[in-house]
Image (spheres, grey):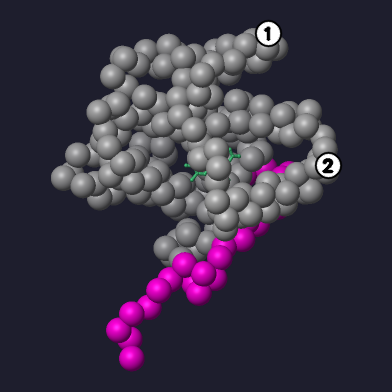
Amino acid sequence: MQLVDAIRSRKSVRQFTDKPVSKEVIEEILEMAKWAPSGGNLQPWTVHVLVGDDLKTLLETIQDHMKAGRMETPEYNVYPPDLKDPYRTRRRIVGQQLYDLIGVPREDTAGKLRQLAKNYEFFGAPVGMFFVMDRQMEIGQFADLGMFLQNIMLMAREKGLQTCPQEAWARWPNTVSKHLELSDDEMMFCGLALGYEDDAAKINELQSERASLSEFVTWRGFD
Ligand SMILES: Cc1cc2nc3c(=O)[nH]c(=O)nc-3n(C[C@H](O)[C@H](O)[C@H](O)COP(=O)(O)O)c2cc1C
């Protein structure tokens, strides 16, 4: 696969088939992804890969919490509370596109919550990953983690797989930390669903937009 095809065909998939992904394939993805750059070559990440009964146990625990109305204090704010434009508008648009696709009207809070809850099933993916960092890390190391994540998502395309990175998991830090047996020094940054796209699923038709270069590039010294 050409790099351009991997980049342009990657998208956040929110419904997967149950077709399993072998450990060998996941290893190949991670073996390549680990060549991401990182400041000082810290390689500041650790990865937990969950499948089968281990994954099922975690997802059932979360389901139990949700049914009982339990909540945890999120690990971090996914977005700033006072998100400015143009970011606020971009977020609103993609959310609107997603809910329009699956027929959830603006005022249907319960419907939106049902969609949010699917994060905690890894959208039906057979593989759930968690990305963990030492709490000591600074902003730069989170950028490193982003590059590592992108490598994983592009390598997944090479293998015919799709992904969805998931900060939604930051809402369940205690349950995830306990399940992964993390130390107090470790924080789980995000999850990642990995598997085969369910091509028939309406929600996977979502094509998010991107700003034009004129909105975010400043050219200097070119003429
Ligand atoms: C770090 C990160 C966390 C994300 N968390 C979630 C999430 O919790 N749930 C979700 O449905 N999508 C999540 N997304 C997907 C974004 O909504 C998506 O990347 C964006 O709308 C652009 O769409 P695309 O990935 O299909 O190109 C996340 C993306 C990133 C990069």
Q: Residue furthest left?
A: 40
Residue drawn at x 49%, y 72% is: 213
Say the numbered circle drawn on residue 68.
1
Residue drawn at x 50%, y 74% is: 214
Q: Identify the amino acid type marked 2.
A: Pro
Q: Quadrant of the N terminus?
A: bottom left
> Main structural element of the magenta stretch: helix, strand or loop?
loop
* Quadrant of res 31: top left
Examine the rendering and report whether any part of residue 129 can be seen.
no
Q: Are marks 2 and 1 in contact (CB under 8 Å)?
A: no
- The quarter of the rendering in which ligand 1 is drawn is top right
Residue drawn at x 42%, y 63% is: 3
Q: Identify the amino acid type marked 1.
A: Ala
Say the numbered circle drawn on residue 105.
2
In terms of depth relative to the viewer, which is nearer, 157 or 43? 43
Q: Is residue 90 left or right of residue 112?
A: left
Badge 2 or badge 1: first in the primary sequence: 1
Q: Is residue 186 left or right of residue 15?
A: left
In terms of depth relative to the viewer, which is nearer, 143 or 155? 143
Local crowd size for mark 2, using a 10 Å CA cut-off: few (<14), some (14–19), many (≥20): few
Please provide the residue range marked out in magenta.
197-223
